[in-house]
Image (tube, helix red, strand yellow):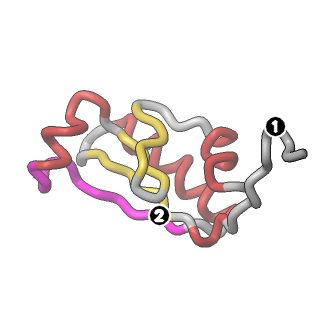
Amino acid sequence: MAPLFSRSSRRNPAEAMVTLIGKPGCHLCDDAQAVIEKVCAETGASWEKKDITEDAELHHKYWEQIPVILVDGKQHDFWRVDPKRLRAALGA
């Protein structure tokens, strides 16, 4: 008999990519970056920053939500970043 809920294997956080979508002069973006830098340093995950003012598609999609945080290309959070939740999303 198969279990009702199967556990997926934990992935290696070092294989994850966190993307911060924000803009210069945004204090929430600066706060999000500080959390992302800390969590990624602790977990070994990579991270990148994208400027919403330089990408029309990102601007159209996320303007009202910045900062937006993606984990492996999928939206994880916006406005504020919870470090515990980010660690969990990274599998740490």
Nearer mark to the viewer, of 1 and 2: 1
Report the span colored magenta: 46-56
Where does the image place residue 92, in percent across and percent down from the top left? Answer: 73, 55
Q: Which residue is at the front of the view, 3 or 21?
A: 3
Where does the image place residue 49, in percent across and percent down from the top left? Answer: 35, 59
**Is there CB contact under 8 Å for labels 1 and 2?**
no
Mark 2 sits on what residue?
47
The crowd level at tag 1 (other Cα within 10 Å; few <14, some 14-19, many 20+) is few
Q: Quadrant of residue 13?
A: bottom right
Q: Which residue is at the front of the view, 75 or 28?
A: 75
- Residue at image position (62%, 48%) is 89
Mark 1 sits on what residue?
4
Where does the image place residue 6, in percent across and percent down from the top left? Answer: 79, 47
Where does the image place residue 22, in percent across and percent down from the top left? Answer: 29, 45
Q: Quadrant of the N terminus?
A: top right
Q: Which residue is at the front of the view, 82 or 71?
A: 71
Under mark 1, the amino acid is: Leu
